[in-house]
Amino acid sequence: MEKELYRWQEECLKRWTAAGGRGMVQAATGSGKTHLALTAASRLEKETGSGLRVKIVVPTGALMRQWNQTLREFLSGSGAQKASTLGQKPDIGLKGGGQKSSPDHKYMIYVINSARYELARQILTELKRGERILLIADECHRYESGQNRLIFEFMPYIEPYADRFFSLGLSATLPGGEAGRFLSSVLGSRIYSYGIAKAAALHTVSKYDIYHIGLSFRREEREEYEELTDRMTIAYGKLLKAFSYLRGLNQKELFEMLRSLAAGRDRKVAELAALYMGLAYKRKRLVCQAGTRICCACDLIKRLPPGEKVIIFGESVRQAQELYALLDRRYVGRAGQYHSRMGNQANRNTLERFRSGDIRILIACRALDEGLDVPDASVGIILSSTSTQRQRIQRLGRIIRKNEEKDKASLYYLHVQETSEDACYLPGGGENRILELEYLPQTGEFYNESYERAAAGLLEEMRFSGADEDKIREAQRCLRLGSVRADWMAQTDDIEEKIKGLERVKDRNYWVCMKRLRRFAEDETSHPERNK
């Protein structure tokens, strides 16, 4: 039997069918794009009759293996497939990531690197043979440039067979401009958009909170940052004198123009453009490598519930290795790292250990932005990040996949205050909270003004009522843990329900503390004049 779809998936499939089985879908990571595509294939085969051959293209080996597993589960759960195969194994082939299946399988999953030079020829051959083809391009924004475009070389030749060719592009962030126009020409136009805010509001992904944690430079880092900024300002001023049009460009446009100037024949202009770009790179690297990021991540993890799975995203392998060394000593055997220097097999082993729960902290670089499905991972820490919106959405998507045992996901975004780094991870949270924290490296504490006022009020009330020192210390312990969570903002009924299911005294104490903090927060909202 076909698994029940969300309403957005049904609406999307109707539009795709109405468009002749061609088009692209932009949907939040974790909202069900894979199941949408497999249901589209299943329904298409029922409508057109047997003989449909499905080609799935993915950007990485990890994503190929994930699709393979999901496809096998989907087919084994399909009554129609069971009846047609009489218990035989699903006819699935893999190409790439060490797999070299022949292309004659009903379902073929390709890693893009292996699809470039053969997929187009295979599709055209099978169309001429009378087959029906469905091309599913996952993370399709990756296939609009360079050698990846080769997978679409068959397109100019399929007009005689157009009624037998179908396509579905999937992405959390479809591109615009020339890239978007090219993808529309080969996969079909965008037929549906389903963003994170809408997915959260309709509960097709987990509820989530985003925490912006402000960091400070160390003194020598601050001095270097200011020196680099001064030199950039001088260089930019000289460039503006010669090229006033640079003033109105955004950052991407500015650097594209500077690269053009740096490659030009005017030696002085080229040197000046190259100098500015070099200084900008050094300053960005300084911000990404700020020393307090590692300390903050370690102190943050101390305060997180010990049963929650944590994914830490960074931009630098060296930074990931440094953090791993610290966490591996503190949580022996419970942390793992995933990045380009680990090797394919080591990375696969780490992912499997993370999925199975053998390790609970996974430290990764960009390699995990696409291709990770761990529904029970509930905490993400952005150790350092680029400003690319696509990357930010993908990283949030890694932790908001629905899971019955997950109440809520939390994403912590570390940023250096008073620098060029964005202070906001994603604009707007919809129904989801965005909280502002400041990390104090001297004490390892986290500061939020409203929380601190409520905490101080609770401790003062306890002392006034004659609570002994043991109870005061226990309350302080609970308050330190709660400083990096939004538990104190939960509804009182939800907190009371939580308390009922707890057995450990320390856990009950924590939630009783959060319940009392909730009252202080409500009093502050109702009577703001008390805090003036």
Image: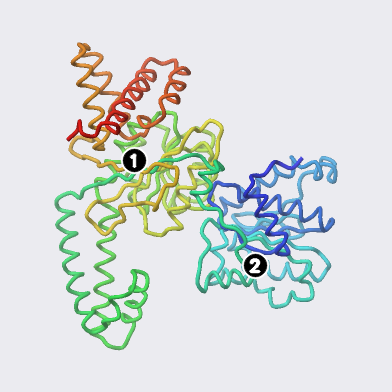
Return the residue found at the far bottom.
Answer: 265
> Relative to 197, does residue 175 appear above or below in the rendering?
below
Rounded to the nearest angstrom, the CA distance separating label 2 from label 1 is 47 Å
Residue 384, given in percent of the width and then of the height, sits at 34, 51
Name the residue located 34 percent from the left edge and 78 percent from the top edge: 257
Q: Label 1 belongs to which residue?
A: 325
Of 317 and 7, nearer the camera is 7
Which quadrant holds residue 334?
top left
> Closer to us: mark 2 or mark 1?
2
Which quadrant holds residue 476?
top left
At label 1, which amino acid type do we have?
A: Ala
Q: Label 2 belongs to which residue?
A: 188
Which quadrant holds residue 76?
top right
Name the residue located 51 percent from the left edge and 59 percent from the top edge: 173
Label 1: which secondary element:
helix
Q: Is residue 223 left or right of residue 495?
A: left
